[in-house]
Every structure is written in C-alpha cells, then in structure tokens.
Image (cartoon, rainbow, N blue to C red):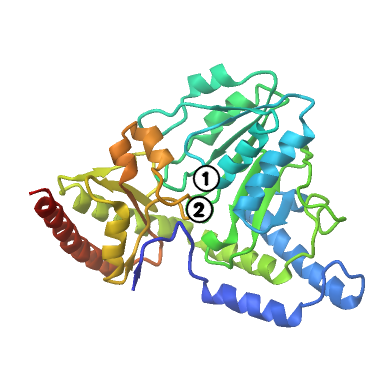
Amino acid sequence: MIYLDYSATTPINKDVLETFNKTCINYFANPNSLHKLGTESNNLIKAATKQISDILNLSDEEIIYTSGASESNNLAIKGIALKYSNRGKHIITTPLEHSSVVGALNSLGNIGYEIDIVNIDKNGLIDLEHLKSLIRDDTILVTLALVDSEIGIKQNIDEISSIVKQYKKCYLHVDGTQAIGKIKVDLKNIDLFSFSSHKIYAMKGCGCLIKKNNIVIEPLINGGKSITPYRSGTPTTALIASMSKALKLICESIDSNYKHVEALNLKLKEFLIKYPNIVINSTNNSIPHILNFSILKVKPETFIHALEQEDIYISTKSACSKSNTISNSVMALTNNKEIAESTLRISISYLTTDDEIEKFMEVFDKCYNQLIIRRKNENN
C-alpha cells in the first residue's frame, strides 16, 4: 500500500498509541472527580497541557480541548460572534477555507451576521489592500487558514495581523490544522488558533482551540465547568495525553521532516509537469506537504479509483468537502471551472519514502496513458 492522503488523516504513531493505551488503563477515572483517582487523572491532563503550552509558548489557561478542529473552528467563530455581537456583526474570511469554517459562517449569516470574502492573488495570498478596504469598525473577526487544506497555500499571518490589530474590537482566528507539526508556528500575533490531533499522528476525536487570555468567548457546549469554563464535558484524559505526546514528537523533528518532504515534492512536480494535460495548482506559497494538480478532461474520481486498484491512495479535495462538487479553493485561485472540476491532491508525510514516490510515478504513468487513450477512443 502507498498512502498519499496524509492531509486527510495520519496513521497513529506507535509511541503515541502506547501512551493512549497506558493512560486508558491507569488513568480511567473522571478528571472532574474529587477523589484520589480523579485527582491523578486531572494532574496528568495538567502535565500534558503544560507540555503543549511549553511547545507553543503559551500559558496553560489558553488551551481549550475539543473533539477536533471542526469543533475548535466552530467554537472560535461562533464563540466570538455571540459574545461580541454588541460590537458588530461583520466577519471577514477567505475563499480557501475548510468546510467547518464555511459552515459556521453560513450559520451566522442566517441569523443576521454579514460575511465578506477577501480576494486572493495569483499565488493564493490574501490581497492585503482588499483586506484593508473590507475591515471596518464593526468587524469583530477575521478568520482564515494558516495553510489551506486543498492547495497548501501558507498565508503571511504577521502581515494580516498587523492590519487586524489596528482595530481594537476585532480578533484574528487562524485554522492551523494543516500547519501544526509540518511548519513552525508562532502564535504571538494570533488571537485564536485551531488544530486537531489526527493530523499529527495521534487519535481522532481530540483537538485544541488556543484562546488568548484577554479574550472571552461564548461556549457552544454548556453544562458546568470542566477543565475550562469554555467547553463542558468529561475530559478525555487518554486523548489529551496522547495528543500532547504526538505534538512533542512531531515538533522535535520538524526541520528534518520538512526537508525530506520538500525533496519528494520537487520530484513529483518535475514528474507531473511533463504531462500535457496536467496543470499544477499548488503555488510557490504552498507548503511541500500538499501538491494539488488537475488532469484536464479526466474525472478525478476515475483517476483515484484507477490508482486505488494498484493500492495507491490520494484524494480530490479536503476529506470534509461535499462530493461531486468543484474545488472552491482552486476555482478561487484559477477562475477556471475546468481546472477546478478535475483537481487531485497528493499529500506527503515524513513517513513517505522515495521508493513509494518512484512506484507512484510508475503506476501514475500507466493509469494516465490508459485513461487518456480511453478518452480518445470514446471521442472517435
């Protein structure tokens, strides 16, 4: 098997799994319980939180545990909107956002919030002048992905933050799900930051919302104080401990991992650009972990299933996107419906080997030629 869909989810690191299993067995008590076993579970969560806060240069109180990035994004966006509606109901986003951001914004739009979408340039970067023209005294939130999930475009957060910070009643939320563990992140100019554990070789079902201490948000899940007043429910001790372990492991080798992925990405690009019907959609501002391209005149689902027959796995769009739809991100970038209808995404990991890329290229060439020949025969 050759797995090249790491942006959708990652396999669990064996050391992380061991931490999860040991925690499940030894720290099963409810961390909110007042007895000794509950206190031990709570202390383990505090230790895991301290490790995360040290890695990300935060205070422990700025970490809110959630069920994943989708919940974190919803909590950040709706939490700010509902808490600060007296300041205004205007929010700015980009056309490159994950469906959990789009869905949250759509729900707010239905109850009277005004959502504006900032333009992007030919490289996928936010048009800063357009952002300046959109932001107003009643803008309460700018929400965007540090790295978008389909094309891999990395935004310049410091430049964006410098604009947002001129408006004291406006906050900056950054979806860091596709960035955490792949590139170094600096949260000093970010008010709220979301990520998920299953993108960093840990379990599904756990994530984080980083919320700076000077900000108050309205909870989405009510029911009494847990380990934070912003998210009720029984804390998932084993998931939290294993996420903390995963973050520590992935950040320790982030530089060498990046160089490895970068070399594989370059090899793939040089291979793909030789084909006349292929358009590379990832730009110079895309991180190397994501390579988005289109094969014109070929349905992406057809190509995915052709590769699947050879036990090779890639994707079309974000795993959370609706099927049988164009890529909104690629459409916004290229303004070309044909390209946006035929996108494919290869996402690479530090686990990806050179041999796997060589085999992928061999099988890709075979599938490409077979499908192009079939299409020519059908048109004759």
Check whether the beta carbons of the residues at disc 2 and disc 1 lie within 8 A of each other: yes
Return the residue nearer the eye: 282 or 163.
Answer: 282
Which numbered disc, 2 or 1, marks the residue that appears first in the sequence? 1
Q: Position of residue 33 (x, y in %)?
A: 89, 70
Q: Residue at the spot x=27%, y=43% of the render? A: 280
Q: Residue 98 shows which numbered tag? A: 1
The residue at the point 52 percent across, 71 percent down is 12
Q: Amino acid at mark 2?
A: Cys
Disc nearest the viewer among 2 and 1: 2
Instruction: State the image coordinates of residue 356 (x, y, percent, origin top left).
Output: 29, 68
State the SS at label 1.
loop
Name the side, left or right, on which 3 lies relative to 142.
left
The residue identified by callout 2 is: 320
- Category of crowding for the residue at label 1, using alpha-carbon neighbours closer than 10 angstroms: few (below 14), some (14–19), many (at least 20): many
Regarding mark 2 in the picture, which secondary structure is present there? loop
Furthest residue toward right: 34
Q: Quadrant of residue 261?
A: bottom left
Q: Residue at x 43, y 52 (%)?
A: 323
